[in-house]
Amino acid sequence: MIIVMKAGAPKDEATAIMKELEDKGLQPMPLYGVERTVIAVIGEERDLSIGHLESFKGVEKVMRVVEPYKLVSKSSKASTTIVEINGVKIGSDQIAAIAGPCSIESEEQMDKVASSISQLGIKIMRGGAYKPRTGPYSFQGMGKEGLEILQKTAKKYNLATVTEILDIRDLDNICEKADMLQIGARNMQNFELLKEVGKTKKPILLKRGLMATIEELLLAAEYILAHGNPNVVLCERGIRTFEKAVRNTLALATVPLVKELSHLPIIVDPTHGTGKRSLIEPMTKAAIACGADGFIVEVHPNPSEAKSDAQQQLTPDEFAILMENIKPIVKAMNKTL
Amino acid sequence: MIIVMKAGAPKDEATAIMKELEDKGLQPMPLYGVERTVIAVIGEERDLSIGHLESFKGVEKVMRVVEPYKLVSKSSKASTTIVEINGVKIGSDQIAAIAGPCSIESEEQMDKVASSISQLGIKIMRGGAYKPRTGPYSFQGMGKEGLEILQKTAKKYNLATVTEILDIRDLDNICEKADMLQIGARNMQNFELLKEVGKTKKPILLKRGLMATIEELLLAAEYILAHGNPNVVLCERGIRTFEKAVRNTLALATVPLVKELSHLPIIVDPTHGTGKRSLIEPMTKAAIACGADGFIVEVHPNPSEAKSDAQQQLTPDEFAILMENIKPIVKAMNKTL
Amino acid sequence: MIIVMKAGAPKDEATAIMKELEDKGLQPMPLYGVERTVIAVIGEERDLSIGHLESFKGVEKVMRVVEPYKLVSKSSKASTTIVEINGVKIGSDQIAAIAGPCSIESEEQMDKVASSISQLGIKIMRGGAYKPRTGPYSFQGMGKEGLEILQKTAKKYNLATVTEILDIRDLDNICEKADMLQIGARNMQNFELLKEVGKTKKPILLKRGLMATIEELLLAAEYILAHGNPNVVLCERGIRTFEKAVRNTLALATVPLVKELSHLPIIVDPTHGTGKRSLIEPMTKAAIACGADGFIVEVHPNPSEAKSDAQQQLTPDEFAILMENIKPIVKAMNKTL
Amino acid sequence: MIIVMKAGAPKDEATAIMKELEDKGLQPMPLYGVERTVIAVIGEERDLSIGHLESFKGVEKVMRVVEPYKLVSKSSKASTTIVEINGVKIGSDQIAAIAGPCSIESEEQMDKVASSISQLGIKIMRGGAYKPRTGPYSFQGMGKEGLEILQKTAKKYNLATVTEILDIRDLDNICEKADMLQIGARNMQNFELLKEVGKTKKPILLKRGLMATIEELLLAAEYILAHGNPNVVLCERGIRTFEKAVRNTLALATVPLVKELSHLPIIVDPTHGTGKRSLIEPMTKAAIACGADGFIVEVHPNPSEAKSDAQQQLTPDEFAILMENIKPIVKAMNKTL
């Protein structure tokens, strides 16, 4: 932590803040310049609040030196964490491919999806039983019944499942029925939910919030790890910007940057990341080319009848073409599918 | 709803989508132009999904004509909703002033705040018992004990209280202990929580999300009204932009715009809206001048010792000055405090 | 400047960067902590490039201590700069009101505007002869002929004028014909243009760019002052965000923040700042209430026939009402019109 | 164009706007619904101003049906435009690689760069003689002398050159000395400059503005084409968002989206798009994988001595590694270098 005092701030103001730091077991080192004093602080700065220090008299600004997260940091664990689900090692040289509809709508629908994607070698199926919808009049998901359909069709085709959790009260049931829990973009900072999934050992798919910084994404993951669950897979799914020609702005540089900062695996969601069917394949390729550990794509047997996200779901045939077309890129990256 | 077909799309593609609309009880009216067909749709378009229609073959784009919310719309109720708490009529000519610390930290702290603000005529006190913090190592709030302190000190000084709810499991207890429930910016799209508070009759302070559009804010309120609770007060508290000289960008035009679109009252939070103590007074004045129904400000007996938001809380003395300095603006707007 | 070395960076890497700093006449002061070294730099840091220092081996990050501008800073001149035009002292207790059409379209149009606004006591008229339009097929302005109309009608009604400059080649002519030069949002970082207007003594109205930070706005003004022209009036006119219900997000906190950082006067443009006629009056009031030195509003004798910005220009009658309605706020702020 | 009248707007208001449309040679087709009237407009809507129509009484909103650009649109020319420079066909199956320093600093520096990149097979060298810098105290470029160094070293190594133009007054000289003109992000909407380079036949590298939409980028290109110059290469270089862990947010989905909308070639600038040396290689790979026609990267013989952008320039050795490492991706995309 670096504390910059205001130009001309009297020495006793610097002394007051140094006393506070010493009381907290830290070691302040002052530099008395001609114009102003600068205090460098040695010790565990994560326990200090910038706001607290900035509120001291005479302080101009306070700057962190180290990142505010610990457990998710590469400095706490050098090797990439591998989260294994149904034989897929997310975080390894194997590109994890997750596919399935936006919403679970019927057993027939799920059977068609499960059948088609399992034939392409997919091992993890997505499907939402609880849907976070912007307005109250939109389809809100099938709930418990949807979870049962998900579990049943997955079992039939030997697929693992990932499904979104919205409400802590559903935690036990979802943990029983699904293999991986998704924390959606709108819940990335639902800290109570993060704490609770952190108390399970379930693999967690943590999606970046629409307006969350990369640091906030890592801090959200830190909540989960700090509560005991190391099995977190991050997901870049686009951020909200001024651009309206796409649904979201897929910020792919997040992938190599997270790989520098953290040991957690990271996948990409080109479906929500663009919101446009024709952009999904090129952005899946780009995701793999910049080092993503996998991707998650929406597939529906009949997108125009889908109850949500109709304009961005692929048909099984379109998805089969995508899986074929990405092969050269996967190979170019020395990875496998 | 307006559906624009692609240039040169064959007529049967337009026919297919019109059949779908008729099946849903709507009345499509086609316009066959030279280059392309446009279909205007008469009827309740809120039940239609744009994505669903855009996924039809031959469709170029689908545009809504009316807003997607109903109950919160000015067209459903012309007069401003008044939410009354402890004699303060939020939405009337009376400017509602809400004050109190970011976090409840001790009984002594709350007693000092309650004593000082009640002397200034404040009737509603804020204070957080459950705190949504970006990182897991920050102070997370006093929880139940905090709620009890809040209730006790409020009663002593005849204040009503507003406190944030993060977890549905705390709903009953918070409803018992506090007078108004705050849905914070990070939970504005926690739809399960919105549904549950919508089932109570408690006044709700609904803060705009960091990344939420005004339409999304109104849709979040629509969730609460649709579940039975009409007592919603909206709050503009700044959005996240590229600008880093302030904590958030306080988008004050939200105030007059919401007043055109909705009958719900709206207040402003200049504390979080700027994150900088010196900007709170000018932005409170500006909020009142553009028509806000009130404001909410953080006040702490000793900000530099605060466990959160230290740099943006006012001392009781600073708050007393603010209350004095806004009087001419309140009067200029023909309102009362 | 504070330079933070990487954890474990060898001492000779810190030595190398300190040598560089000494060679540039600065005084580096190292702090050797247990984990890492921090170097505080005493001296004129504005001449140092952060990028240059960050490219040294072993450097983790470089943080500025002081703002990168000098001449516009409050620390270089404590009293507010007053820019006087036609008797209006922008930066004093007098609220400067500037009005006129988006584009100059005809002598008849300008005569009507000039006549109506001069009757309301307005002393400065705006009007664009050169128009920066997003697409090449939109009306590009009347050019030289427009300037002559502007000059002629202004003289008739004893008005001063402000008009936008797009092209350095027009500088002499515009300086001859108009009283104040506007640098529009799209040219805020047209540095060659800033340098050239900096060589004149003309009052400059410098509008904040759509994507410019407050620091960048001040640095753009610094260009003008550094080239010799101290007569700069800043203008907050809204920034681009994700919100689409308004044309731009009017960031009013810019006003009190700029007043803390700089001695330059700052006015607000609620017309472009909202893009919606009904929001102009409330946001003008808010601008005055938070301390703006004035405002600039678009007025057109017949907005629906305007060649640009039709939906956001006021009629002379609407503008007269605005001028009347803001009076109580102006008075409440102890200012005059 | 679709014009939606307000609910309950009297019929004569619709009649008035239809008369206006007919006067302009367009064909309005009204649909009288129960609640409101909708008018579809057949004809060349690009000549109509949305603002103009929205200012008519009774109009709720006006929506475009077609894109506002013509010449750059895929609908006006189906095949990709190929811009050829020094044997490199930008827009073909050949990936165009452009490299060179941020700023031209000396003949020795340029000779080293030119020598190293030409050995790697690079045919086009970048280098800035005129530099747009945020503050006036930063290095502003070598100007004319720089241009001469650029020309001389390029000739020696048989390289073509691209350099940025900031000021129309430099146009003739830059056209004489360089092979391709760059319009930088800050000048993307310097419309006078766009018009002037549109009157030349020089290849233009048009960079996306920091806060420009894709539609605005295409409209900026439309300015150039409309003035007679078809040789435009677009460049995605990152947009400004709330994320500060990277210098800009590289929005790679722009690449496939522009390829759907326009026939112009598009390359990517991963250097400015990330601002971080370690992210350049992964983002170059991603750019190629999603279909970019090329890339432009900053290379400097000694980045830590560079006068600008030191932290994001590659050394010749690092660049050689990048050129080697992208080969498998280029091959996977069935392209050549």
Image (cartoon, coloured by chain):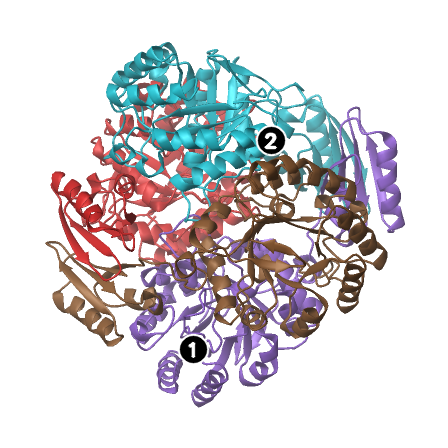
Chain colours: A purple, B brown, C cyan, D red
Q: Which residue is drawn at 65% across and 70% down?
A: A230
Q: Which residue is drawn at 41% across and 79% down?
A: A121
**How far is mark 1 from mark 2, CA to CA?**
68 Å
Residue named by callout 1: A122
Residue D57 percent location from the top left of the image? 27, 43
Chain letter belonging to callout 1: A
Image quarter (top left, top right, bottom left or bottom right) of the N terminus of chain B = bottom left
Image quarter (top left, top right, bottom left or bottom right) of the C terminus of chain B = top right
Q: Is mark 2 on a helix, strand or loop?
A: helix
**Residue A172 appearing in the image:** yes
Q: What numbered label is drawn on residue D96?
A: none
Residue named by callout 2: C332
Residue B195 percent location from the top left of the image? 54, 71
Question: Is residue A211 rendered to the left or right of residue A20?
Answer: left
Residue C19 percent location from the top left of the image? 72, 28
Residue B172 percent location from the top left of the image? 67, 74
Question: Is residue D330 rendered to the left or right of residue B302?
Answer: left
Residue D33, image quadrant: bottom left
Give the vertical position of A221 relative to D311 (above or below): below
Q: Which residue is drawn at 54% across and 85% down?
A: A177
